[in-house]
Every structure is written in structure tokens, then in C-alpha cells.
Image: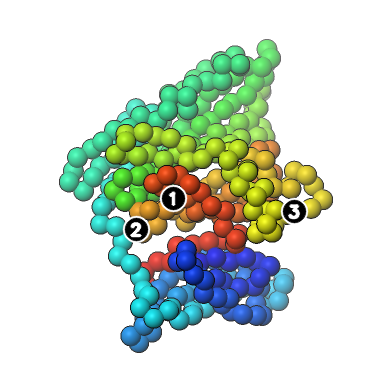
Amino acid sequence: MAFSKADTYAIWFTDGQQWLGPVPEVGLYITRLERAFWRRAGDRWELCARVAVQPTVGARETPMVFCTSAPPGVGPKEASSASLEASPCPDGRSLCVRRSDGTVQTLPLPADLFRPDPSRKVEEISPPEARDEGVRMEIRYRTTEKEGIVETRVWRPVCGAGGRWVVVDFAVYRHPWAEDGAAGGGLEHSELYIADLSAETVRPLSAIEARGQLVDAFRAEGRIPFVRGDERFSMPNHLLPYVEGGCSSDGSFLLFDTGADESGMLGFPLSWVARLEDRVIYPLPGDQARWVERSP
């Protein structure tokens, strides 16, 4: 895995046991870690990162590649051979998983994800419908005689791993509506769910409260930044996850990011790695992370 943290101007590589870096040691402002990959160097391997850099702050970004020698005997591992293809089932409420042998397994998502808010007056419910961005359903709540709230729920499988797990992203968007139109609003919350094909369960990756406790602990240790001056950004109370790195090639881990609070205001981004076997998650020291891929 490769990490980048803007205020260190460097890339670090790790296998979870040891660190290699910083690369480069000094000099350039790295604005974005685009990709990390292995590259042959004679009879050994190099670890490389493609990044966007600014020679000086405010200058135009330039793509560059930086590499460092991997330790002796260290190189890319073979990806998991257990393949599966996950997609929403026709009912829009279940996950259909096709294995390499052609068999299909169906796992219903938790029913609560599709139930309307019992504290609100339901005006209309549209059935789940498959679209390009995933399965989409809308619930219209009336709050006054001529106004209300439209709640849009969208879910999609984002990656399959190890022939056993499928990661599902479930998001809720809300905006007000009126008889003469609708405006405003945005993402209300988003959560990741893990479908375990062996146990035939679909469960949340982690509770919001658990992630918040980890953030507090890592912040106290000085391992993640603290944005001062506005309590909304002290670190978000509700971290909204979005999958950036996806599942690891060996099918054991998930890489995802968080970057907003419950109000939808952007906070300082964090990268996280989750072990799919037991759904234990760890905040990472950098604000950008990528799996190291096989060489192109």
C-alpha cells in the first residue's frame, strides 16, 4: 500500500509490517496520489507511485512517477483466484452474486434500508429501480400542506473479494420540495455494508460511533490532523465513507475514505483500511492511500 500526506511532500510504502520512504525525500508539493504499482528493475522490483505535483504552490499540476527499490525477495503477490460478479437483483432489494462456476447466490439487504422514516408522513414511495449509478428509490414525505422532503436512497456493490465478500455502498440524499418545485439539499449519510457469502449475511462494516472513537484515539496520538477554528471540523462527528481504493488483490482487505461530517460540510479527508474477515478498521496516517497494483 502507498500513502501520501500533503504536508509531508512525500510518498510512503508499506506491507503492514515495514515502511519504505519517504519518496521523494524533499522538494515537491504532492497534491494527489493517482496510482501505485510494481515495476521490474533487473532481477528485483521497484515500488512506484504516479502523483500530481506542483513545483511551487499555485503552479500548474504536473504528473510525475517516483520509485524506490523494494527489499530483497519482496515483489507482487498473486491475486486471489476466487472470482465473483455482484450486481443488484431484479427486485432492487437483494444482491445477486454469480460465481465462476455459473451458480448464483441471492442475499437480501437489511429490510430497514428500504423502510420509510416512521416519524414522517409518507406522501409517495417509488419502487427500487436499477440505474447507471446503482439501485435508486425515492420516498416523498409531506411536512406541510404544500411542502415536504424527498429522500433518495441509492445502493450499489463496489467490489468483491476473496470469493466470499461483497462490499455494498448505501447512500441517502435529501432535499426539500414544494408544489412549485424543489431545490437544495445533498448527501445525508452513507454507509458501507459487507455481504458475507459463507454466512449469508449483510451487515454494516462498522458503527459510526466506533469510527469516531478511533478518530479521537488517533488524533490524541498525533497521527491524524486536527482542523482548528471551527468545531464542525474538529473531526467530523459522522464520517461519510466512500470507496476509493476498493478491495485488495488478495481479497482480505478494503480501502476506503471518509471526508465529510453529518451536515455535508467537507472535513479533512481520512483513509481507512478494513479487514473483511472481522470488519476491524484502522485509520491510516496519510490522507490519500492506494493499493500497490501489478506493473502495467
* Label annotation for residue 152: none
In this picture, residue 57 sits left or right of residue 67: right
The residue that mark 1 highlights is 275
Above-or-below relation of 179 to 66:
above
Q: Residues within 10 Å of mark 2 (few under 14, many from 20)?
A: some
Above-or-below relation of 187 to 100:
above
Choose top left, top right, bottom left or bottom right for residue 292: bottom left
Report the front residue among 134 and 291.
Answer: 291
- For the point 61% across and 16% down, the residue is 119
The secondary structure type at the circle numbered 1 is strand
Q: In the image, what residue type sits under mark 2?
A: Asp
The residue that mark 3 highlights is 227
Residue 197 placement (x, y as % from top left): 31, 39
User: Distance of mark 1 from mark 3, alpha carbons?
Assistant: 28 Å
Above-or-below relation of 240 to 290:
above
Report the front residue among 66 and 199.
Answer: 199
The secondary structure type at the circle numbered 3 is loop
The residue that mark 2 highlights is 250
User: Distance of mark 3 from mark 2, alpha carbons?
Assistant: 35 Å
Quarter of the picture holding the C terminus: bottom left
Q: In the image, what residue type sits under mark 3?
A: Val
The secondary structure type at the circle numbered 2 is loop
- For the point 53% across and 61% down, the residue is 289
In this picture, residue 246 sits left or right of residue 76: right
> Is tag 1's residue or tag 2's residue first in the polypeptide sequence?
2
Q: Quick check: can you spot residue 9?
A: yes
- For the point 43% across and 24% down, the residue is 111
> Is tag 1's residue or tag 3's residue first in the polypeptide sequence?
3
